[in-house]
């Protein structure tokens, strides 16, 4: 009597293991980041987006639209057309790959913008330090420009941090990255205001 009971228990255990494996496989197949984009035509792309939205959710839909926009921006910057070229660039890719590609382009663009602002701020600081005491008019205009640039730089750095965090959250399960970005880079702090003309540095 014990042998049939043991065999039955063994079969039940194997069924449980098989059910768990199938459930895990189903979860992987339902994982939104593994969705393959279908965009061989505009009509096919719109139909795919309409079906995929439910599985993607609002956050991923926003990221995907942002990524596609950045890919189009990059193609136009390189002299290529939009529309069909964008669809060709994303057709057949997984959602993860499209996000890594598009958000990676966005990260590079923001980093370039931040770098340009940093250089401009350093130049404005040099001009401000070189002014004679009492030269208030041009100095005030320079200070106002510098304040606006610092605000833009802080905004760009906040957006850089947000994009980097989003890219980190959609990495491949094994940690590999396929986007054109380097996760080791960190944004540069906003330069401090230069000392006023004639001001003395504190004693060290």
Image (cartoon, grey):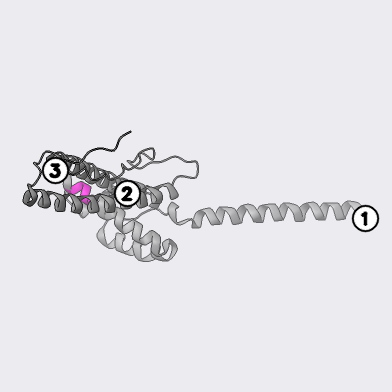
Question: Which labelled disc corresponds to residue 160?
Answer: 2
Q: Which residue is mark 3?
A: 128
Q: Nearer the viewer, mark 3 or mark 1?
A: 3
User: Which quadrant of the view contains residue 203?
Assistant: top left
Q: Earlier in the sequence, mark 3 or mark 1?
A: 1
Crowd band around label 1 with a 10 angstrom C-alpha radius: few (<14), some (14–19), many (20+): few
Q: Residue at x 44, y 46 (%)?
A: 171
* Tag count: 3
* Picture layout, residue 23 above or below residue 130: below
The foreground one among 88 and 3 is 88
Question: Which labelled disc corresponds to residue 1?
Answer: 1
The N terminus sits in image quarter: bottom right
Q: Residue at x 28, y 49 (%)?
A: 106
Position of residue 90 in the picture relative to residue 1 (left or right): left
Q: Does the rendering let one see residue 87?
A: no
Magenta-colored segment: predominant secondary structure: helix
Question: Which labelled disc corresponds to residue 162?
Answer: none
The span from disc 3 to disc 1 (Cα, nearest Å) is 96 Å
The span from disc 2 to disc 3 (Cα, nearest Å) is 28 Å
* Picture layout, residue 77 above or below residue 45: above
């Amino acid at each position: 009597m014990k042998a049939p009971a043991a065999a039955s228990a063994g079969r039940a255990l194997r069924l449980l293991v098989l059910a768990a494996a199938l459930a895990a496989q189903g979860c992987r197949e339902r994982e939104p980041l593994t969705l393959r984009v279908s965009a061989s035509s505009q009509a096919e792309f719109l139909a795919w987006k309409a079906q995929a939205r439910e599985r993607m959710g609002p956050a991923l839909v926003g990221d995907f639209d942002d990524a596609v926009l950045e890919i189009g921006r990059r193609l136009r910057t390189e002299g290529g057309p939009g529309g069909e070229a964008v669809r060709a660039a994303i057709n057949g890719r997984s959602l993860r790959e499209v996000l890594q590609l598009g958000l990676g382009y966005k990260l590079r663009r923001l980093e370039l913008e931040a770098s340009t602002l940093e250089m401009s701020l350093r130049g404005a600081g040099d001009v401000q330090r070189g002014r004679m005491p009492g030269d208030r008019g041009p100095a005030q205009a320079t200070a106002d420009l510098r304040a606006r640039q610092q605000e833009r730089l802080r905004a760009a750095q906040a957006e850089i941090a947000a994009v980097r965090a989003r890219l980190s959250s959609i990495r491949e399960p094994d940690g590999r990255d396929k986007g054109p970005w380097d996760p080791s880079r960190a944004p540069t702090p906003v330069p401090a205001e230069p000392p006023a003309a004639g001001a003395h540095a504190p004693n060290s």
